[in-house]
Amino acid sequence: MLGRTIDDILTRAHNRVDVQISRGAMLADEAGMAATKDLDTLVQIAAQHGAVVRLIGDPAQLFGAFGAKFTTSGPLLLI
């Protein structure tokens, strides 16, 4: 499995460089730290290449540090 950052994939797509995505699944670790807009773009790019995105992360890492006010918003709420 090739490890890459979300920013690398988004930059490649923006610059019309091969994003090197094949059919299958992509795992996005630390998904709670990614911007919702970036995750949305990543999902769109993956779909164009016949792939799906699975979000992975520990909500306690982010929410535990900043308190309960973040538990009702953000990308993790969408899953």
Image (spheres, helix red, strand yellow):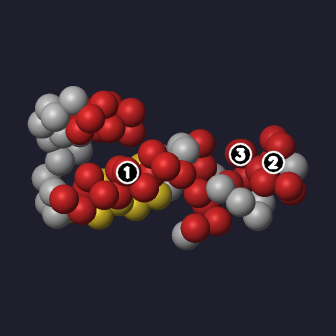
User: Which residue bears the numbered disc 1?
Assistant: 41
Q: Is mark 1 on a helix, strand or loop?
A: helix
Is residue 12 at all visible to an observer of this figure? yes
What amino acid is labelled 3 in the image? Gln
Res 50 → quadrant: bottom left
Asked if 8 appears above or below 27 in the picture, the reply is: above
Q: What element carries label 2?
A: helix
- The x and y percentages for residue 70 are 78, 54
Q: What residue do we see at 17% from left, 47% from top?
A: 21
- The x and y percentages for residue 78 are 58, 67
Asked if 53 appears above or below 41 in the picture, the reply is: below
**Marks 3 and 1 in Cβ contact (< 8 Å):** no
Asked if 26 appears above or below 35 in the picture, the reply is: below
- The x and y percentages for residue 66 are 83, 43
Q: What residue do we see at 86% from left, 56% from top?
A: 68
Is residue 31 at all visible to an observer of this figure? no
Comparing marks 2 and 1, which lies closer to the viewer? 1
- The x and y percentages for residue 79 are 55, 70
Q: What residue do we see at 40% from left, 61% from top?
A: 54
What amino acid is labelled 1 in the image? Thr
**Marks 2 and 3 in Cβ contact (< 8 Å):** yes
Other residues around mark 3 within 10 Å, as few (<14) / some (14–19) / many (≥20)? few
- Residue 31 appears left or right of 65: left
Specify which label sits upstream in the sequence, 2 or 1: 1
**Distance from label 2 to label 3 (Cα)?**
6 Å
Q: What residue do we see at 25% from left, 56% from top?
A: 46
Comparing marks 3 and 1, which lies closer to the viewer? 1
User: Which residue bears the numbered disc 2?
Assistant: 64
| Label ID, residue 61 | 3
